[in-house]
Amino acid sequence: MTTIVLAGGKSLRLGRDKALEKLGGQSLIERVIDRLSPLGTEIIVVTAGEDQSFLPDLKVKRLSDVYPGRGALGGIYSGLKAASTFYSLVVACDMPFLTVALLRYLMELSPGFDIVIPKLEGELEPLHAVYSKDCLGPIEAMMGEDRLKVTDLTDRVRVRYVGDEELAIFDPERLSFFNINSESDLERARVLLGKERAFLNI
């Protein structure tokens, strides 16, 4: 399986590129890639523009959106198109507390489905989900219709929803889905990181 990290967000609420925001001495994107490394997958980082000089040396494959300006849906399409595997795990670059056990579980559920997606308290988490290459055609159709909401894709393909009870087995605090959008989110992330390090005694 391939892992696709979307790093094309405009960070409007934070006011600067959140992929490079520091947390525990690492940029968010470096921390996300570190969290993904135990999965042993091909990792692709997708950015919105051609200039990728803002990214640190990540030792992963990097590419630009095939269809710029199409948001997360375009980023997913670009990553799936470039992936060497039929299935890809898609995450955002601003999710510092990804849980490997939960990600592995999503991956294990993927055979027979085009999307495996968490449904947290009734809300879908499309940037913490597995997609198959069979999503490429439906995504192209959606972009042609100027429908860019990622969750609309679930109406067009075979979907396995992962509900609250399943999620709680692997991540009872739901920290996998915590992402950075504001200064207060950053402050909370620093507190959580301190607790994590204290628990691990590092």
Image (cartoon, rainbow, N blue to C red):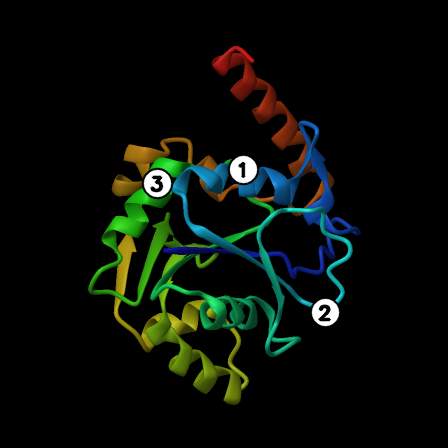
Q: Residue type at mark 2?
A: Glu
Quarter-of-image position of residue 96: top right
Asked if 57 appears above or below 70 in the picture, the reply is above
Callout 2 touching callout 3 (CB < 8 Å): no
Q: CA distance from mark 2 to mark 3?
A: 32 Å
The residue indicated by pointer 2 is 50
Callout 3 touching callout 1 (CB < 8 Å): no
Question: Is residue 98 something one can see in this rendering?
Answer: no
Q: Nearer the viewer, residue 38 or 168?
A: 38
State the image coordinates of residue 66 (x, y, percent, origin top left).
59, 77
Which sits earlier in the primary sequence, circle 2 or circle 1? Answer: 1
Q: Residue type at mark 1?
A: Asp
Question: Is residue 100 something one can see in this rendering?
Answer: yes
Horizontally, residue 42 falls left or right of residue 157, namely right
Circle 1 sits in a helix, a strand or a loop, which is it?
helix
- What residue do we see at 60% from left, 19% from top? 194
Q: Nearer the viewer, residue 31 or 115?
A: 31
Q: Residue type at mark 3?
A: Leu
Which sits earlier in the primary sequence, circle 3 or circle 1? Answer: 1
State the image coordinates of residue 100 (x, y, percent, origin top left).
39, 37
- What residue do we see at 72% from left, 41% from top? 21
Question: In what quadrant of the picture does the N terminus appear?
Answer: bottom left
Of the numbered discs in the image, which one, if any, rests on residue 150?
none
Quarter-of-image position of residue 72: bottom right
